[in-house]
Amino acid sequence: MHLTADLFCDTSRFNTDIRGFMEDVRCAMQDGAMGTGSSVVPGSAGLGGVRIGARLDMLGLTRRHVVALCACAVGFGFDLMEIGLGTVLSAVFSSPGRQMASTPLALLLSAPYWGAVIGARVLGGWFGQRFGPKRGMMAALLLIAAGSFWFALTTAMAGLTALRAATGLAFGAFSPLMFTYLIEILPPTKRGRLCATVVAVASLGAPLGILCIRELENTVLPLEPWRCVFLLGSLGAFVSALALYYVPESPRWLSSTGRIASAERAVRQFEQSQKVSLTRPRPTSVAPKAPTSRMETPKLLTSQVVLLCVLFFLGPWVTTGFPLLSGATFIAKGFNLHETLTFVNVATLGPAVATILAATAFESVDRRTSITACAFVMAAALALFAVGRSPRTLVVASLCFEIVMALYLTALNIYTAELVPTTRRAKWTSNAWALNRLGAGLAPLVLVPVLRTYGVSTMLEVLCGVSGIMVLISTLSPRGMTRRSIQ
């Protein structure tokens, strides 16, 4: 009842929120024209940001936080489902009777990641930093809804590729904006655990989508099963965008842009919401001892920034390349389409369960240690998949990889968002994610020809080598901000 009340009590303030949005747009346009970056007297945002940040950190977890977590989890679930359906497309168009030439298939599989490169910088970096991470997430979900709807109804291969690229604009924006938003509103001592829980719930999106396609294979439908699931994803993304309307904008972001009054209204929505028992309010290292415009966020060295950029670029060659081509890899090892979808579905179920079980560890293990260990285990899982022959060995190796990959991506996104101050968080994390999506776009263009020309073993050797480089770079990266307050 309390959650329902929290969710719908904002309806009476609809006109006020619209006026607030138009005011934010007007201020943002003035900021751009004047080059000030703030709509208030210089210096006022820094003091207000410290005070509002301290209030959020000392608040603990409330029902308003839970509503925000649920909205993000559902939206991210449909985002991951749409991305995960690329595995189905690689299997469908590699199966006998539907096999596509390597170049068109590589273009189709890589198209959303090329779109994500632009989307991360424009929709995530520019729009998200200018109009707020919540509104950026809403825009991304509406774009997914429109793109997936038309994708399901399109038959021409050129049209399918173009629509996947257009939808990719949203894929590049939603993830960094979601982590930016959650890092800014959640209590420091619990944000790693709660972000991991959101990812765990959202990770069910891909296996459920694949399961639906598998179950609909022998059903008489007006459209192919995979097209029906894309329609389902379109509807889910639209509903998720509407749900995000009832979530407050990030008070830290509002304060950092000089919208102090709006930030006060947003933080009061959290303060006036009933607390929940998952966590207790605790004083943190940002307790307001004295007004200051600087908090604990470390200053990154140029060499460290370069290492993080390289890590974001190399990561998707493994974390995207192998899952995306796992369907085609099973086909190449002699399994039929039905068996392949079964194996892929089992493998994609693992991350949700494992992330929930590992959620508590996110607050006890340093982020850098987590991503280093995960990169090492991914390399071992790829090696096992390369030498495996039996279905059991292949499924175990694939399942291990998917589990550790989910933990790696979660830890990396939290780690990066915590290192960057609020004034640059949405832009910096989105630009880093653009590099990630650039690597994801290049991976199929290189790995599909390698798979078709040199075989599965050679492709997996390449991925193992990339994983080894990731381990080395992770050990040289800066330490994280686990359980510490952010600027």
Image: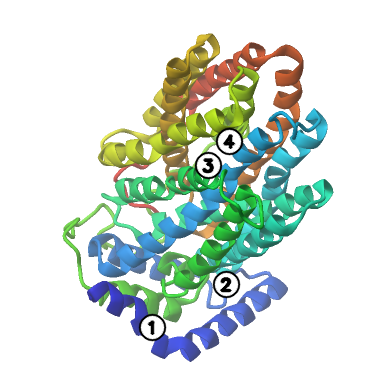
Which of the pair 111/423 is nearer the observer?
111
**Residue shown at 33% from the left, 58% from the top:** 186
Q: Label 2 near label 4: C-beta < 8 Å?
A: no
The residue identified by callout 3 is 214
Q: Distance between the residues labelled 1 and 2?
A: 27 Å
Residue 202 placement (x, y as % from top left): 43, 50
Q: How crowded is mark 3: few (under 14 residues within 10 Å), some or many (20 or more)?
A: many
Viewer-side residue, 331 vs 193: 331
- Of the residues under marks 3 and 2, which one precedes in the sequence? 2
- In the picture, the disc for residue 312 is 4
From this view, report whether residue 368 is shown above or below residue 379: below
Q: Which residue is drawn at 53% across and 85% down?
A: 18
Disc 2 residue type (three-letter): Ser
Query: Are the residues at dot 3 and dot 4 in contact (C-beta closer than 8 Å)?
Result: no
* Residue highlighted by disc 1: 10
Q: Can residue 95 be seen in this view?
A: yes
- Give the Cα separation between the discs numbered 4 and 2: 30 Å
Distance (Cα) linking label 3 and label 4: 33 Å
Image check: 48 left or right of 394?
Answer: left
Left or right of residue 70: residue 91: right
Residue 184 position (above or below residue 450): below
**Point 45% across, 20% down: residue:** 397
Residue at the spot of label 2 = 38
Secondary element at tag 1 = helix
* Element class at badge 3: helix
Nearer to us in this view, 415 or 402: 402
